[in-house]
Image (tube, rainbow, N blue to C red):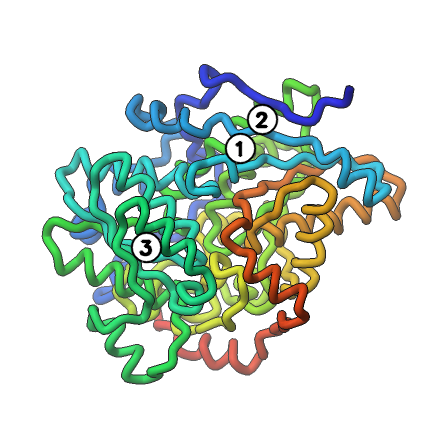
Amino acid sequence: MKETKIELSEKEIPRKWYNIMADMPNLPKPPLHPGTKQPAGPDDLSPIFPMALIEQEVSQERWIDIPEEILDIYTLWRPSPIYRAHRLEAALGTPAKIYYKYEGVSPAGSHKPNTAVPQVYYNKVAGIKRIATETGAGQWGSAMALAGSLFGMDVTVYMVKVSYNQKPYRRVAMETWGAEVHASPTNLTQAGQKILAEDPESPGSLGIAISEAVEDAATHGDTNYALGSVLNHVLLHQTVIGLEAKKQMEKVGDYPDIIIGCCGGGSNLAGISFPFLQDKINGKDLRVIAVEPTSCPTLTKGEFRYDFGDTVGLTPLLMMYTLGHDFVPPGIHAGGLRYHADAPLVCQLYHDGLIEAKAYPQTTVFEAALQFAQAEGIIPAPETAHAIRGAIDEAINCKEEGKEKTILFNLSGHGLFDLQAYADYHDGKLVDYEYPEEKIKEALSRLPVVD
């Protein structure tokens, strides 16, 4: 029999996270205080983050210990399996070997609990009573609600309004785990009120939801903020994915030529690729591809500039590829990829040529999702279907070139709460959005000026 699942024992769960900042040829420029535009220090971040996470945010140590309390919860779904996609390979007629790391086995159905659990743990240790956070498609909000329930922490989620309406069962899942969920923008915060005053029908965006969650945390002494992507410590926690994947690939005597992840903020891509990028930095021949939607083409059409991480301008300025902090992308079903910028670490690696980027419209992404589901059986989330599209295209290239390459992608979430998106695809209701260049230029014209 062909080996389909490559598994590890619980004893093989990584006991340390990998910090790519120890090996990067160039580190990102420092975050800047939104008012003074001077480098932000721990005191600037302490109103919304516990010191343990601030230390991880700035650390350049290569390995950071995972506390036993976190490892104990990780065993609920870790190690996650790697699958060899034999049936998809056969359907494509490709000589390529395709593997996927399946993070949909977590209770929340995605990779997001890998960082939600540590973030709630460190806040709990610091004496925080409540977490305020945002969510795009609901994957992150679900993970935070789950983590809050496991540690007895209250969680308030600002969910992007278009996704709140498109994905009601994600809201129900969050509420089932005990979280309070609001459709963002709301009238509960000054940030939300400002947006609604300008556009009462605003569909919301991740940037807006972040503004509301940050304001909530900053104005309540018992509350901290948690972010599901972008920041260094978030990407750090996700490296448990790639560290496991390296062990699994070693078990079958293989190593990827190409690694692919969807990219909205960057945690998915970073999780699977950063441990392998350590090898590339040290001379290994390897391609890493970030796949994003054409409706929110951050890496492929954005500018490498300082910008706010949120819409209203409450967060520090970060050096990122950005479309502009007040950019509001169309309401595509891949809500988790509707973010105006990307993680500074991912952006720096892209700027230095260590990773590549591609953008796809949503109909061709759903074509790939159906092809994958019908071959492999798993219905993927719309976000992770972008990685599938990239993997299929690379496998087709191998077929056309007659080359056998090893492709590894991160299947970061199931799509069982995204069936309305599939229904819309089947009914021919999905529309492809190519964001107009003039709209991007308009948003970029409003970026903050940094000397």
Q: Position of residue 353 (x, y in %)?
A: 60, 49
At a point 84% along the width and 37% down the height, the residue shown is 95
Residues at marks 3 and 1 touching, judged by CB atoms closer than 8 Å: no
Where is residue 306 drawn, in percent x and y? 39, 63
Tag 2's secondary structure?
helix
| First in sequence: mark 3 vs mark 2 | 3
Residue 246 — which label? 2
Visible in this render: residue 65? no
Q: How many marks?
A: 3
Which quadrant would the N terminus be assigned to in this image? Answer: top right
**Residue 161: assigned label:** none
Image height check: is 138 above or below 89?
A: below
Kindly identify which numbered label has been placed on residue 242: 1
Label 2–label 1 contact, CB within 8 A: yes
Find disc 3 in the rendering and name its residue. 31
Residue at 44% from the left image edge and 64% from the top image edge: 163
- Around disc 1, counting alpha carbons within 10 Å, would you say few (fewer than 14), some (14 to 19), or many (20 or more)? many
Amino acid at pointer 3: Pro
Q: Residues within 10 Å of mark 3 (few under 14, many from 20)?
A: many
Quarter of image, res 205: bottom left
